Image (spheres, rainbow, N blue to C red):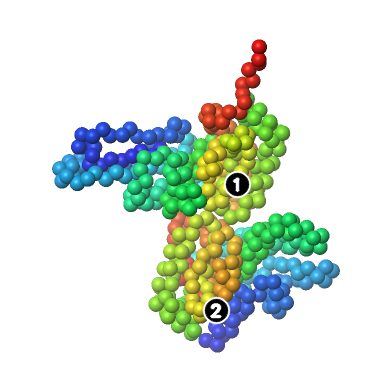
Amino acid sequence: MALRAIAGKKTLTLGLGFGPRGAVAASCPGLGLRLRHVRGLVTFSLPDLPYDYGALEPAISGEIMQLHHQKHHQTYITNYNKALEQLEEAMAKGDSSKVVHLQSAIKFNGGGHINHSIFWQNLKPANEGGGEPPHGSLGWAIDTDYGSVEALVQKMNAEGAALQGSGWVWLALDKEMKKLKVETTANQDPLVTKGANLVPLLGIDVWEHAYYLQTELAVGLKLNPTGRLDQT
Amino acid sequence: MGFPLLSPSYCCGSQPSPPIFHGLLRFKPVTSLRKPSSQKRQLCQSGRASKILAYYGLTTPPYELDALEPYMSQRTLELHWGKHHRDYVDSLNKQLAKNPLYGHTMEELIKVTYNNGNPLPEFNNAAQVWNHDFFWESMQPGGGKLPQGGLLQQIEKDFDSFSNFRDKFVESAMTLFGSGWVWLVLRTEEKRLSVVRTSNAMCPLIWGDIPIIGLDMWEHAYYLDYKDDREKYINTFMDNLVSWHAATVRMLRAEAFVNLGEPKIPVA
């Protein structure tokens, strides 16, 4: 249980580490940060998965994991870096309209990077404990706020199914209210856009690219894997 | 495409309204909610007030599901039309069974449910049903190439050249964040063609423009065939799928609503 507590803290740190405090993020080696000393601009690179692409079968296919990680997540990172470079130039020149114009690209691509980095940590192969119900303080919190894990899974499934277009479903901790919350965000908006005091514990990517290649998931069973995801 | 369904009042002698069709769509009703006549008579005799429901059918694409191979696979059509599009229709009908939004064509229903920016829950389903109908008809086997005649002239007038328009269309689709659609529309106020982008279920009908071509950029539209290669999907659409015939017909209809200043009748 101590291990899980540590892992949980790491997840929280990861969740917090992508804010403007690049220094905090730099202390977590798994995040693939690379400091560019030349201009002092922090750029990002694709973090490695803590498991093989095929390790999550049959819940999520290796093909989906590879595409999702190497193509989609990489694209978000590439475009995020590009947007940050352009932002730096625009800020140096004092070009306010360019600075504001870049915000949507930063929110989208930066958010994509944040969200997916959390997502990879949320998943674990079944033989390493993935899919087991939560223990310890998280399990207790779920029982207090939702009654049971099944009720929580049902709520998250309902929110995910009701989401129109692309987005994410989150299990969040409201730091101020000290309660668990289920939230959804649109497109690649990170959880902080729904509240500065929300800490992501578990995120589910409900963009179609996350499941479409597995037909049985595409035709509507997609959120069943929620029950099989690691909930550290 | 939508037709009003009257249940008990049919047998009670009042005039049944004619079904309201969309002129351009090939209508093939797939299922019907008509009750068997004995049941209808029973309800009639019970003296209850008749309940009028709106109900819309799923139209089929104007080609076989494998006709767009190899550019859009049969599997994609089966899932995209057979599951997603059908789901939108079924969900809409379920919602309409409880909500008296009666007597609208699909286009009208979208505007009504959009509710000037405060969309009703039916909006998403209604708009997606219309969008997908429009999408299937924006494509054809052996599509692509160039438009001809008046439409080509109008494009060249409004975009300087066809390739300029094509680049704009592709760029618009590539830079879309999230789910959405890309359209070639005729702007009713500016009286010119334009490329616009909408998110999720939004449709240019909302603000009164007339769509000429629509491209579905939701991931489910291309993921099975192209995975994450959106550029290839968009280019394939422009080169091999888009139906300029359908676009021309829509343009002809649109010109009845928007005066493009043609023909130029010489003054004597």
Horizontally, residue B10 falls left or right of residue A115, namely left
Residue at mark 2: chain: A
Of residues B75 and B153, the one nearer the viewer is B153
Cα gap from disc 1 to disc 2, whole angstroms: 38 Å
Count neighbours of disc 2 (C-alpha within 10 A) and say few if under 14, some if 14 to 19, many if 20 or more: few
Q: Residue at x 23, y 39 (%)?
A: B9
Image disc number at residue B197: 1
The residue wearing badge 2 is A175
Q: Where residue B226 appears, x then y in whole percent?
A: 60, 50
Q: Where residue B162 appears, x then y in whole percent?
A: 68, 34
Residue at mark 1: chain: B
Q: Residue furthest bottom?
A: A2
Q: Residue at x 27, y 45 (%)?
A: B51
Quadrant in which residue A140 is drawn: bottom left
Q: Nearer the viewer, mark 1 or mark 2?
A: 2
- The kind of residue on which mark 1 rests is Arg
Q: Secondary structure at mark 2?
A: loop
Count neighbours of disc 1 (C-alpha within 10 A) and say few if under 14, some if 14 to 19, many if 20 or more: many
- The kind of residue on which mark 2 rests is Lys
